[in-house]
Structure formats: structure tokens, C-alpha cells
Image (cartoon, grey):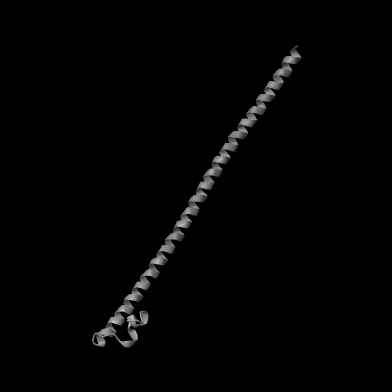
Amino acid sequence: MRLVVTSRVFFFLKKMAVWLQARRNYRSLRGLIRLQGVMRGASVRRQTAQAMRCMQTLVRVQAQVRASRVEAMERRNRQHHGAMLRDGGRWRAGSQVLDRRTPWL
């Protein structure tokens, strides 16, 4: 009878040891999953920051291109109006926009 109780206790202890080991493994796995989530979050934040820097650079370049186009257009307008004033306020034959766009007028 004593042998049966001892074997039951042994199996109970073995079962408890397996349960404790499983619990430790689960807790360490949870910690790894949490660490993995933190690392992924940091990676996503880093990726987002890089994307924002790229977008900011694109916007800056677009603004520079737009400013240079406006400046060029203003320069052409000043040259055109200067030529008109030199001709006494009349359109020169080579710069008549209406003749080129609408030949029926």
C-alpha cells in the first residue's frame, strides 16, 4: 500500500513539475511576444518617420519647381509688356496670341 501512495505522489509531483515548466515556458513566450511587438512597433515608427521625411522632401521640391515656374512666367510677362510699351502700346505681329489661337478672328 505504501508503494502505491508513493507512486501516486511521484506521478503527482511529476505532473506538477511538467505543469510548472509549461507555465514558465508560456510566461517566457509571452515576454518574447511582447518584446517582438515592441520591436515591430519601433520598426513601424521608424518606417513612418522615413516616409514622412520623403514626403516632406517631395513637397519642398514641388514648391521650388512651382516657384521657379511662377518666376519664369512673371519674367516672360515683364519682357512681353516691356516690348509692348516700346512699340507704343500696340501688339507686334509676331506676338499676336489671338491670331495664332483663333484664325477666324
Answer with left or right where residue 96 lies relative to residue 51: left
Question: Viewer-proximal residue, 42 or 76?
Answer: 76
* Count of numbered badges drawn on the protein: 0
Q: Is residue 6 above or below residue 42?
A: above
Residue sitting at x 67%, y 28%: 18
- Image coordinates of residue 14 in percent, x first then y, are 69, 25
Q: Nearer the viewer, residue 72 or 96?
A: 96
| Residue 33 placement, left or right of 97 | right
Residue 19, position as x, y percentages in the image:
64, 27
Q: Of all residues shown, which one is farthest toward the top?
A: 1
Vertical arrangement, residue 69 with respect to residue 84, above or below: above
- On the rendered image, what quadrant is the N terminus found in? top right
Residue at the farthest left position: 88
**Residue 22 locus on image (x, y percent):** 64, 31
The answer to whether 19 appears left or right of 55 in the picture is: right
* Left or right: where 86 falls relative to 104: left
For the residue pair 43 and 66, the one nearer the viewer reads as 66
Relative to 50, say whether 29 is above or below: above
Q: Could you say where residue 45 lies in the image, as x and y percent from the top left? A: 48, 50
Picture quadrant where residue 105 is located:
bottom left
Identify the residue at image location x=60%, y=37%: 29
